[in-house]
Image: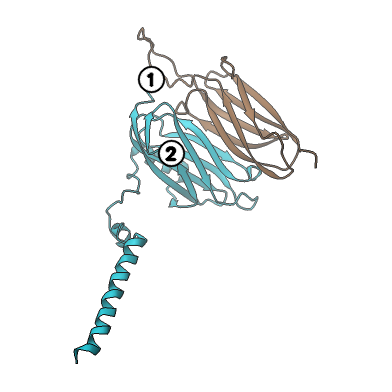
Chain colours: A cyan, B brown
Amino acid sequence: MSQPDELPRRSFLQTVALATVALVGSGALIRPDRLLAFSPVQGPEDPDTPNEAVAKIYRERFGGRPITRGHVQLDMPAVAEDGRIVPVIIESDLPMTSERYVKGIHLIVDHNPDAHLAGFYLTPAIGRVSVTTRIKMKRTTWVRAIVETSTGELWADYTKVLVTLNGCG
Amino acid sequence: MGTNVGDARIRVPDRIGRGEMITVNSIISHPMDTGFFRTKEGDPIPAYFITEVVVTYAGEQVARFEWTSGISRDPVVSFSLRADREGPLTMTWKDNKGAVYSQSVDIAFAAA
């Protein structure tokens, strides 16, 4: 009589095993902080809480409006051996039409003497948001690329750069 | 690239089709001194850097950059441009000592 029970039980165990593999594979178990919506714990991809200089920039430039991560890609090396020359690429998939366009990109380096390192102010004639340059960095810090649209939305991307040689003096 | 402060170059593709999205590359010779460094003799090196870049295309301002001394020495900047008309693309760099440097390239469309 044990034979009829055996098959469903094995089938169930296989299903559980497959589901576990699928969960791990999808990365759902790697970022438990993201599953807890009310968790105050910051994940490794979240920038530090703004320091005084960054908070001042947020107040003065954005009036404390909410900034959402997305629609912006900030590419920088994870490790910058020479803080005097660190490449930066900022891109966005936001539209560049006369009705709605990216009017400004703000590049903020939390622990630099001038935290608001640069502003790039664009018009629809530019057609596409893609700016590259090279910057100086004093020490290991979070870097923020904050994009402001003509309709007042604020989108951002953040990355942490490990700096070995101080490039600011 | 020249060695005098303010020597600048702008590069655009050789052949541009009407309405094409192009990348504009630029470089200008400038020390971009932060004001935080000293000479070997111990004298402070005063801040000396580009504060603003204005980009015009066929007479219309299409972009403006606000810079600090955090931009690296001999600043490079690249950006996109929708080449939808023929005319000069001009970049004007201003520094904190009041100097103004300018460079232009012509945007012209390749014959069809």
Kindly identify the amino acid type of the residue bearing the numbered disc 2: Met
| Secondary structure category for the residue under label 1 | loop
Q: Quadrant of residue A128?
A: top right
Disc 1 vs disc 2: which is toward the camera?
Answer: 2
Residue that label 1 marks: B36
Report the side of B1 relative to A41 (left or right). right
- Tally the marks: 2
Q: Residue at x 28, y 55 (%)?
A: A40
Which of A167/A9 is in front?
A9
Marks 1 and 2 share the same chain = no
x and y percentages locating residue B78 in the rendered image: 57, 35
| Secondary structure category for the residue under label 2 | loop
Host chain of mark 1: B
Q: Is residue A153 above or below residue B10?
A: below
Q: Residue at x 31, y 51 (%)?
A: A43
Q: Residue at x 39, y 30 (%)?
A: A137
Residue that label 2 marks: A76
Q: Quadrant of residue A117?
A: top left
Report the side of A88 relative to B106 (left or right). left
Q: Is residue B49 above or below residue A23?
A: above
In the rendered image, the residue lying farthest to the bottom is A1
Kindly identify the amino acid type of the residue bearing the numbered disc 1: Phe
In the rendered image, the residue lying farthest to the right is B112
Residue B67, label in figure: none
Q: Residue at x 43, y 39 (%)?
A: A76
Q: Quadrant of residue B45?
A: top left
Host chain of mark 2: A
x and y percentages locating residue A50 in the rendered image: 35, 43
Which of B54/A71 is in front?
A71
Which of B14/B31 is in front?
B14
